Image: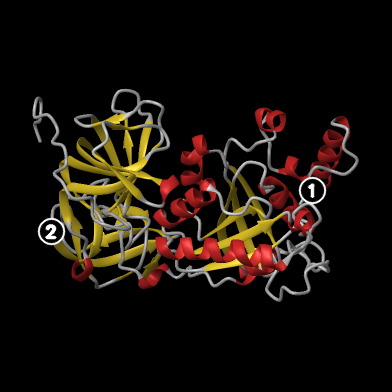
Amino acid sequence: MTSTTGHGPLTAEQLSATTLLRFATAGSVDDGKSTLVGRLLHDSKSVLADQLEAVERASLNRGQEAPDLALLTDGLRAEREQGITIDVAYRYFATPRRRFILADTPGHVQYTRNMVTGASTAQLAVVLVDARNGVVEQTRRHAAVAALLRVPHVVLAVNKMDLVGYAEPVFAAIAEEFTSYAASLGVPDVTAIPISALAGDNVVEPSAHMDWYGGPTVLEHLETVPVSHDLTGCPARFPVQYVIRPQTPEYPDYRGYAGQVASGMLRVGDQVTVLPSGRTTTISGIDALGRGVDTAWAPQSVTVLLADDLDVSRGDLIAPTATAPAVTQDITATVCHLHERPLRIGERVLLKHATRTVKALVKAIPYRIDLSHGLAHENEPAALEVNDIGAVVLRTAEPLPMDSYAVSRLTGSFLLIDPADGTTLTAGMAGEPFAAAPDGEAAEAADEGWDF
């Protein structure tokens, strides 16, 4: 892997010194999204020689003189045959300024769930628009999903500018329409960039055809966009994954709680609360990499020792007493339904939150969001179908320490799972990111068999 400045392969020291940006791409069919990703990888010299040779051979077999860079990301046979992106493709590349994990997500409406999956951990989303078509329904859908998932930065890449004569008014009109729509959704930061992925204009190198544009290229923006990796400023959350009790002569009384610090910082001497029990104690020690330390921060994996002998097990959450989350059995959430089988009122599911899994009941589905018309609500639908985004009201068998997704994307998210076969049904975000549910009483779940 080489740098964009031609300085040769990045050393381990250089890689460790660079920050990491997770970003997702989205675009309607034939907007050139896969070509953009391929161009980004190719021009940043992040493609291995054998990969490029394979793309060149495949392109020649299809009668194309130049390499089809979209083949660098459309890896599935069905994707290559149909010329569309179906699955989420993850790519890793690096420049001297930053490391990247790219989630290339599909554009078809029936693959909305795939975009949700790819964008769920993204710090930036690149939304592609064909300059000839402008902002279309699927563009608005992608912007809404980015807003729902609280993606902090959005790049509007207006592609195929070469097919509209590199006209500034075309770009300006599209940028204005999209920016206004994104602002209405609460997207905090939008950067519009005119590009031609096929020709390479403004992807990695500045375009010679658009001297009216004075902003960054796509790669330059990705390298310089401010991304906060400092989770230490957030309230500390430590989901317990495993209880360690060696019970050996060397460690006769050792009892530690292993896990990964999800956010914030933990210090020896901190007063903490174990949830959901609500018992309080202090941190008496922290072990990291086989030695004791005074402080641990996200995303370190450590073992926490407590001053008191409490009943703590996998699935419990350790948090500072002053900023501990509320514990509840009633959860209202925005969800994206991922499975072909509909989610219905009265359905019994498993809810996986951090390291804890509990039984839950779907009490109500207050509304479904119609992303093709902004964020219009369809009140009290009979069910949520695959790719639907809407609100649900859940009742859990046991109390859970749940943050709002607006506060923490880590401890405010959860999955609904089929208890019969373990299939993932729905991805959830606690709280309602945009507005309260519409007026009207939510449909009540049937009480038959309700035992928690």
Tell me the amino acid under the disc marked 1: Leu
Residue 409 left/right relative to 191:
left
Residue 62 left/right relative to 234:
right
Does residue 289 sit above or below 314 in this rendering? below
Does residue 139 sit above or below 451 in this rendering? below
Mark 2 nearby-residue class (10 Å; few <14, some 14–19, many ≥20): some
Q: Quadrant of the C terminus?
A: top left
Relative image position of residue 21 (x, y in whole percent): 57, 62
Q: Residue at x 37, y 32 (%)?
A: 385
Q: Residue at x 82, y 37 (%)?
A: 54
Does residue 370 sit above or below 221 in this rendering? above
State which tag comes first along the sequence, 2 or 1. 1
The disc label shown at residue 48, or none: 1
Residue named by callout 2: 279
Q: Secondary structure at mark 1?
A: loop
Location of residue 197 by image quarter: bottom right
Residue 394 left/right relative to 133:
left
Relative image position of residue 155 (x, y in whole percent): 58, 62
Verify CB contact (< 8 Å) between mark 2 and mark 1: no
Q: Residue at x 21, y 64 (%)?
A: 324
Relative image position of residue 266 (x, y in whole percent): 32, 68
Q: How is the protein colored in the picture?
A: secondary structure
Q: Residue at x 79, y 48 (%)?
A: 48
Nearest to viewer (mark 2 / mark 1) = 1
Tell me the amino acid under the disc marked 2: Arg
Relative image position of residue 97 (x, y in whole percent): 67, 70
Q: Secondary structure at mark 2?
A: strand
Q: Nearer the viewer, residue 11 or 33?
A: 33
Mark 1 nearby-residue class (10 Å; few <14, some 14–19, many ≥20): few
